[in-house]
Amino acid sequence: MTRIEPARPDDHPSFAALFPELETGEAVPDAARFAREIAPTALFARDERMEALGYVFFQIYGRDAYVRHLVTAPRAAGASGAP
C-alpha cells in the first residue's frame, strides 16, 4: 500500500536520489537547503517498506499552490497501487 506523508529533513537522501529524475542539469540542493526550503512544503509517496516512490514539492502563493517538482522513482513509474 502506498502512503503519502509530509517530507522530513531526514528525507534528504531520498530526495537526492530522486532529484536527477527532473533532468534539469542542476546540482542537488544540499541537506540544509532541503530542510529549510523544500521539506516544509513537500510530500513523499512511500511503499510498504517506507522507501520513497516519489515526491511533490510545491509553494503556496496566497490561495494558490504552485507545483515545482513532481517526481516518480523509475521503479514506480507506470505502477499501480490499485487493488
Image (cartoon, rainbow, N blue to C red):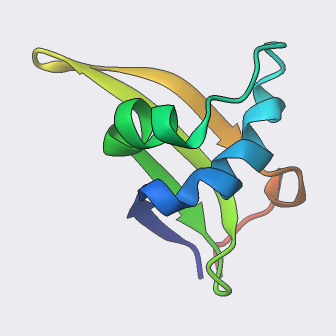
State which quadrant residue 5 falls in. Answer: bottom left
Left or right of 46? Residue 25 is right
Placement of 57 over or under 50, stated as above or below: above
Residue in the picture at 82% in, 32% down: 20
Placement of 46 over or under 48, stated as above or below: above
Percent coordinates x, y for residue 4 in the rendering: 45, 64
Percent coordinates x, y for residue 7 in the rendering: 43, 55
Percent coordinates x, y for residue 19 in the rendering: 73, 35
Image quarter where the N terminus lies is bottom right
Residue in the picture at 11% in, 19% down: 63
Q: How many marks?
A: 0
Between residue 29 and residue 25, name the one nearer to us. Answer: 29
Residue in the picture at 68% in, 86% down: 49
Percent coordinates x, y for residue 77 in the rendering: 82, 51
Left or right of 14? Residue 37 is left
State which quadrant residue 25 falls in. Answer: top right
Left or right of 10? Residue 59 is left
Left or right of 54? Residue 78 is right
Residue in the picture at 52% in, 56% down: 44
Between residue 28 and residue 67, name the one nearer to us. Answer: 28
Image quarter where the C terminus lies is bottom right
> Going by the picture, which residue comes out furthest to the right?
75
